Image (tube, grey):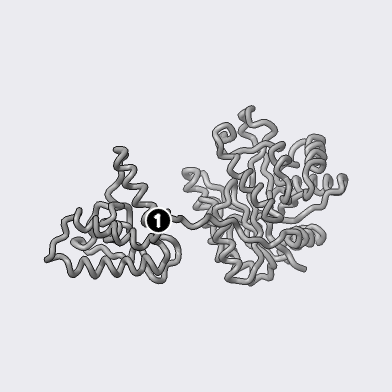
Amino acid sequence: MDYVSLRTQSTFSICQGFGMPDQIVERAKEIGHKAVCLAEGSHTNSHPKLEKACQKHGMKPIYGVVLNVVENHSDKDRNKDNLLVIAKDSQGYSNLLHLANLGYTEDHFYYVPTVEYREVYNLQEGLVVLTGSSLSGDMNEAEERLEEMKNNIDHLCVEIDMSKDQMINRQAMMLSRGNKVPMVATNDTKFIFDGQDEIVNFLTSVKSKGRGRKPSKRSKMATAQDMLDWGASEQAIVNSIRVADLVEEFDLPKAEQLKFNVGNPYERLVEECRVGWKKRGITKEQQKPYLERMFRELNLIKDKDYIDYFLVVSDLVQWAKEQSILVGPARGSAAGSLVSYLIGITEVDPIPYGLLFERFIDVSRYDPPDM
């Protein structure tokens, strides 16, 4: 029997989960999972790393988010339900992003990012929704809530979280059977290996200033056998696979590369360096090391296709200075770039201080430099 963990948090859930997406995907593959779903609380920051990790390990990525949900956000209620929302396709992912962002808007954010049930219903196209904590509490109220969700959500499943209170799970199972809504077994995965619950306990203690909560032993990356041992029904475990099969594979939306609107960006960058050379007052006696350094940097910037990036940032910095907006002299490793100094992005000459350009841009680094 197979199992897919649909409620997994990574280190991107600050002080709540432990394990980078690549480590989670690698472990999931080791224990026989066919897909990996990351569902952080109210944000999607781990999803690009998940996409890369799944491509590397030949796994299927599933993109989710755990939403804090209330009936009416204007009531300013600190007691919120949570729903696990999974993108079934690219349209669903667009709606998932919309919901995640909506929770952070000024009129929705109350202690934590919050959305309303009706907003989930309005944006349910392309989503699979698991009931989360919404069916706890009074049985009659829970049944009304499930009936409401069933009437408004095309792909709805009752979540049976084996890391949580089993009394709540029993109620959820009764509601699932009585209302003919499929149940799906999950375990609120916060760490990868046995023993790492102590690490998560430490992290939550940091977050809550010493009042940490040790997660359940069942919050590890689990196998189907683990889930059976913890009391999950075979059908609920099989349904985790059915949800994973329902999800299409799609590419995450990508931002278009920055473009600086000139005929030849490289010539423009070289020209700005020439202007900066005179402005910075570099003498003939200094010329040799500066020329060598400048052309070495320019060649690597060109090879990495960062020319437009440098021109755009330079344009932003120059505009800010012209508007009398304070701009710092340099940030982090960007101070190691002579080109940045020449075109006015930074105010630190890296050569007298022996600052390394490779700390900023290196042949082996694929992420864009952070200025």
The single residue placed furthest to the front in the displayed view is: 263
Q: Give me the residue at 68% from left, 49% from top.
A: 85
Viewer-side residue, 210 vs 78: 78
Q: The N terminus appears in which quarter of the rendering?
A: bottom right
Asked whether residue 132 appears in the rendered view, the answer is yes
Which quadrant of the structure image shows residue 62? bottom right
Location of residue 258 in the rendering, given as x and y in whole percent from the top left corner: 46, 55
The single residue placed furthest to the left in the displayed view is: 285
Q: Give me the residue at 51% from left, 44% from top.
A: 211
Relative to 152, is 312 above or below?
Answer: below
Asked whether residue 217 appears in the rendered view, the answer is no
Location of residue 296 in the rendering, given as x and y in whole percent from the top left corner: 30, 70
- Report the number of discs: 1
Q: Secondary structure at mark 1?
A: loop
| Residue that badge 1 annotates | 262
Q: Residues within 10 Å of mark 1 (few under 14, many from 20)?
A: few
Q: Give me the residue at 58% from left, 61% from top.
A: 50
Horizontally, residue 183 falls left or right of residue 330, namely right
Which quadrant of the structure image shows residue 88? bottom right
Location of residue 172 in the rendering, given as x and y in whole percent from the top left corner: 79, 46
Location of residue 321 in the rendering, given as x and y in whole percent from the top left corner: 30, 42
Q: Hey, what amino acid is under mark 1?
A: Val
